């Protein structure tokens, strides 16, 4: 069956034929390629064609598709039954592994997605501060929580970026620009009642937009001064830029961290972590309600643990850095682009020159150039993230040869 036929069938039974909008490829044009298998660096399409995959499920698969260690652990876990709805040993093992490695994460609570982790962190912050207002940053994505689907509106109050969000919710979210210390100061000066400020410390959902450490430090200082909880959303960067994510890499300590993606090794897991007093605001200890039928599912916990264990000795990060550096070196002479990269997170900006740190600084030609590259890569057997503002993910399953071939495609088509 062709992709066109599959897409026609899929559109009959699900809106737009997909279960998450970016998969419909509207940002680059064309129709989706239906996949049926993944192995190492490769995705296999329904017609048997293979692609070197630089999307890697949008980040969870740091070891590539179906690595042997995770496959083995998960297979054994399935044989023990896959959902208990009770306290269990698999989630205890993963929680102890993480809190043992990252001493600042005194406690954590597992949920099923990054969105749930963010929703829970925000609820904790509102409960412990007794405040309603939230501050987010334009260009950061925090999942499809109502209060986070905001873009910068007039006068820094958020404007809903989705239909179906009440005016009341929108009014409680303030939206600040990235990389702008003065505006940040102004917002805290005007609003002394912000419960939480949430940021991707390395924004990776609207291009890769590395922030100056001084800007993040300023945010942390303002939060402390005003009794606002600082939440680092490390759903992408956690266990990716380093085992301890941006907290470790930047040596900055937020009050709460949200995780997703790698923490479940490609299975549905998210988590919120931080100080005991904040986590114990959650039921059954505290008054903040949060629950989940499938939370800390033992198969997902086992996948997460097998994945994180493979990262502990640091060799994976060294390999990813080497692959990233190989791509960077191969593109260093290209005069019409800029590779923005932190470790294994890579994003092509359509203009050389200064680092792009805000959505406003993204060149107008970005979309058109990226769409051209995407389709040329697809024809050459390379699957790139299907949006000009999504980052590409390297995995330990990629090889230097594959990365050099990617650089060739970029030089020719971007
Ligand atoms: C930084 C960040 N936060 C939250 C989310 C939402 O996570 P999920 O898609 O697992 O709900 C994402 C997803 O891409 C993300 O990148």
Image: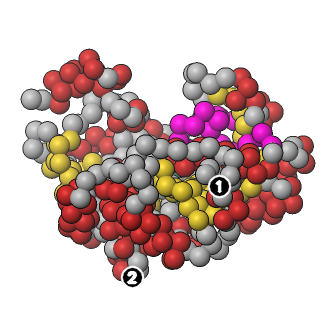
Question: From where the camera sits, is residue 306 visible?
Answer: yes
One can see residue 177 in this view: no
Q: Earlier in the sequence, mark 2 or mark 1?
A: 1
Q: Nearer the viewer, mark 2 or mark 1?
A: 1
Kindly identify the residue that appears in the image at 51 percent across and 77 percent down.
Answer: 101
**Figure quadrant of residue 157:** top right
Where is residue 280 shown, x and y percent of the image?
66, 58
Left/right of residue 394 with respect to residue 126 in the rendered view: left
Identify the element where label 1 is drawn.
loop
Q: Is residue 336 above or below residue 343?
A: above
The residue that appears at 60% across and 33% down in the rendered structure is 146
**Percent position of residue 382, x then y:** 24, 51
Q: Could you tell whether 237 is left or right of 213 in the image? A: left
- Asked whether residue 136 is drawn in magenta, I would say yes
Tell me how far mark 2 sits from mark 1, CA to CA. Answer: 35 Å
| Mark drawn on residue 51 | none
Quadrant containing the N terminus is top left
Q: Is mark 2 within 8 Å of ligand 1?
A: no
Q: Which residues are magenta?
A: 131-152
Q: Quadrant of residue 393?
A: bottom left
Colour style of the rendered protein structure: secondary structure
Q: Which residue is mark 1?
A: 285
Q: Which residue is mark 2?
A: 313
């Amino acid at each position: 069956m062709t992709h066109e036929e599959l897409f026609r069938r899929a559109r009959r039974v699900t809106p737009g034929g997909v279960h998450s909008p970016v998969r419909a490829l509207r940002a680059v044009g064309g129709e989706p390629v239906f996949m049926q298998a993944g192995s190492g660096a490769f995705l296999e399409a329904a017609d048997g064609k293979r692609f070197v995959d630089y999307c890697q499920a949008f980040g969870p698969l740091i070891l590539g598709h179906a690595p042997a260690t995770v496959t083995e652990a998960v297979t054994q876990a399935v044989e023990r039954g896959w959902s208990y709805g009770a306290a269990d040993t698999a989630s205890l093992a993963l929680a102890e592994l993480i809190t043992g490695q990252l001493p600042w994460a005194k406690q954590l609570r597992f949920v099923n997605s990054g969105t749930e982790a963010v929703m829970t962190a925000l609820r904790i912050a509102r409960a412990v501060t007794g405040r309603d207002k939230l501050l987010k940053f334009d260009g950061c994505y925090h999942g499809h929580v109502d209060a986070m689907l905001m873009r910068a509106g007039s006068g820094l109050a958020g404007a809903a970026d989705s239909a179906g969000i009440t005016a009341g919710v929108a009014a409680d979210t303030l939206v600040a620009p990235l990389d702008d210390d003065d505006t940040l100061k102004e917002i805290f000066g005007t609003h002394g009642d912000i419960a939480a400020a949430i940021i991707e410390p390395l924004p990776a959902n609207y291009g890769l937009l590395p922030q100056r450490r001084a800007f993040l430090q300023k945010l942390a200082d303002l939060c402390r001064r005003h009794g606002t909880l600082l939440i680092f959303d490390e759903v992408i960067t956690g266990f990716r830029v380093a085992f301890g994510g941006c907290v470790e890499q930047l040596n900055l300590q937020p009050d709460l961290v949200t995780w997703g993606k790698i923490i479940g090794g490609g299975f549905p897991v998210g988590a919120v972590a931080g100080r005991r007093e904040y986590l114990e605001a959650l039921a059954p200890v505290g008054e903040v309600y949060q629950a989940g039928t499938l939370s800390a599912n033992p198969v997902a916990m086992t996948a997460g643990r097998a994945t994180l264990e493979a990262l502990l000795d640091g060799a994976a990060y060294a390999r990813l850095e080497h692959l990233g550096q190989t791509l960077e070196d191969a593109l260093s002479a290209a005069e019409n682009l800029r590779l923005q990269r932190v470790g294994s997170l890579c994003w092509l900006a359509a203009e050389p020159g200064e680092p792009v740190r805000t959505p406003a600084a993204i060149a107008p030609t970005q979309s058109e150039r990226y769409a051209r590259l995407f389709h040329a890569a697809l024809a050459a057997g390379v699957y790139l993230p299907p949006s000009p503002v999504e980052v590409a993910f390297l995995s330990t399953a990629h090889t230097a040869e594959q990365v050099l071939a990617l650089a060739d495609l970029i030089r020719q088509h971007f």
